[in-house]
Image (cartoon, rainbow, N blue to C red):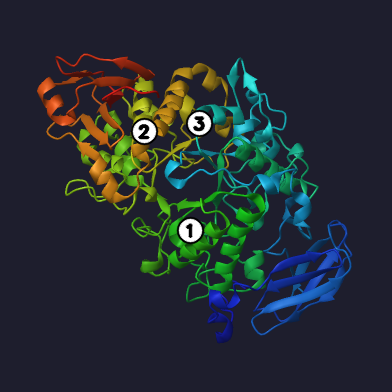
Amino acid sequence: MIGTKIKISDRIKDLTYDEIKDEKLGAIYKNNKTTFRVFSPTSETLDLLISDDYMKVRKNKYQMVKNEIGIYEITLEGDYKGYYYNYLVDNKYEVTDPYSFTASINSLSSVVVDMKETDPSGFRDEGSPQNLEEDAIIYEMSVKDYTADKSSGIKMKGKFLGLTEEGRSLDGVKTGIDNIKELGVSHVQLLPIYDFISVDEDDSLFFDDENYNWGYDPELYFAPEGSYASDPYDPLSRIRDAKKMIQTFHRNDISVVMDVVYNHTFKSYDSNLNTLARGYYHRMNEDGSFSNGSGVGNEVKSENAFTRKLIIDSLCHWAREYNVDGFRFDLMALIDLDTIKIALKELRKINPNTIIYGEPWMAFYSPLPLDKQILKGAQRSNSFGVFNDDFRDAIKGDANGYEKGYIQGIFSNKSKIETGVAGSINFDNKRIGFADDANETINYFNCHDNLIIYDKLAISLNDTKDIDSYIKLALGLIFLSFGKPFIYEGNEFNHSKNNDANSYRSPLSINSIKWEDKLNNMDIFNYTKDLIKLRKSIKILRMTKASDIRRSLTFMEDIEESLIIYKLESEKEKYLVAINASMDEKSIDRKKLDEFIKASKISKIFTKKGINKVDINVEDGLILENKSVNVFKLGELNGL
């Protein structure tokens, strides 16, 4: 099999997405019949295997009929709701349906389901919150990490339903979903919740530390992950539980972004996609081997019509059936630009507030043409965003090493920082970014990958006794810049992963949130909460158009490199942001300050302690505490 090139007819290879987008695939259920349709152009024969119990060795077998574009079909009369099924390819290989809406435990069989019966009470009527893209404040988290530790006080630990439990606390501090509500973010980005293959879904058989994975190893793109279900043996449990979790977020005005991995499949030659359609769903080398732009053995050929359809259909399924509000794409550079454009168009028909963003890079070389790769810059004016690693590295240095950034004293990064503050647009001749619109940049200093900020600072600072001041600087830069601010679970209270830079399958003792950290770091938590409140109050930071940003943002020039000072002004509001990254207190003399702000009244509203509304005397100039982020209201002080 390996290295063998499979012949696919020119008719099928030349199909366009528009020609096949309306083809229905999967188990199409009605109470009096179910039609099974699957794309399998390279198989000689295809049979449906079906039974009322996935454990049965003997299953009913039905021969399916193939049409001219490679779709096999059969209709069974009667009510097949809850039946387990697989496809038998060429009497040799038994696989699941790529369009499975749910599955048996550990994805052994697909399951026929009536999705209308899986909605929690009120789910369809309540819909999604109206959080606009320009208001997005994103919080990345893992379903399992967030509730698994005993300190969470949550009963359904590590499960979808754990994130529906409100009112949980540890010694008076809020845990679980109540922490997210208290923080004030607008969007949660969930690490993979689709069906992945690397864990045993019956986690009662394991100690938690033995059965862990982030889930970047996709198996079934339309089905929720069974290990997060309250009953992994019940195929409906994973659907209902996922919907209840999303409903709970929505009831608290929090939108849900789903992390998706379409750039590769965990299995290669033996995946259900490649078994059904040899060499079609993946990019292949001339010798018949898999190309490997993902770095994990294969890459998905998104530009092929049925592959594009699979991606767009599954995205729309999550948006339509689960009310998911946005999608974060892993290794987005491997997904062709046209597919993303079409997906965004279709998703915004379902929810106009849908947001899409992803990683503008890949691991290794890909045969995908360069003009179709979503590298940084490809997002320009295309209504989706990318992670801003320029800003990230300028803030704190490299991802995993000892290199320092601006907050640790590399003040030569100042122009890069100011470019990030301006939303990474082409602000002026000195500050040139990669974006046409500030909505295109995800401003972050860490995510689930690489060293978390606390661990990065712990190894890159010469002295960590004042580590909180550096973390506050990083947080301030992210939240007081144009673009979408993004933090990772636990950043708000100094979560550490013990210097594990790639904890995708490390134990829960490394990954899980320890709620004692919040108890012990309430200063950082309150500071982050205040920053979010402050950002929401500064309406200017909602601006995304480059022309509006250039008109509203002014940097103070000819000051020390350790200082970043800028003015935000509109007809209705005017602010001064002053960041001192130096080890020493700094000052701006009165004359220079007056020339810059042109305001008769100035009030300090944010300091190293958070929101702190006080009138100040600037007769002798502006005094800035060392390693501090300061915000001043210019003119009359209104409510914050």
The quarter in which the C terminus is drawn is: top left
Quadrant, the N terminus:
bottom right
In front: 328, or 363?
Answer: 328
Residue 92 to residue 183: above or below:
below
- How packed mark 3 is, by other alpha carbons closer than 10 Å (few <14, some 14-19, many 20 or more), is some
Front residue of this view, candidates 405 and 463: 405
Marks 2 and 3 in Cβ contact (< 8 Å): no
N-term-proximal mark, 1 vs 3 = 3
Nearer mark to the viewer, of 1 and 2: 2
Residue at x 68%, y 45% (from the top left corner): 242
Amino acid type assigned to the residue bearing label 1 in the image: Ser
168 sits to left or right of 293: right
Q: Nearer the viewer, mark 2 or mark 3?
A: 2
Check disc 3 and report the residue beneath it.
Answer: 184
The percent coordinates of residue 213 (x first, y second) are: 60, 43
The image shows residue 600 at horizontal and vertical percentages of 19, 22
Q: Alpha carbon of mark 2 to alpha carbon of mark 3: how far? A: 15 Å
Q: Is residue 302 visible?
A: yes
Q: Quadrant of residue 156?
A: top right
Residue that label 2 marks = 538
Q: Which mark is residue 294?
A: 1
Q: Amino acid at mark 3?
A: Gly
Q: Secondary structure at mark 3?
A: loop
Residue 631, x across and y down, in percent: 30, 25
Measured along the vertical axis of the image, is residue 538 above or below residue 318?
above
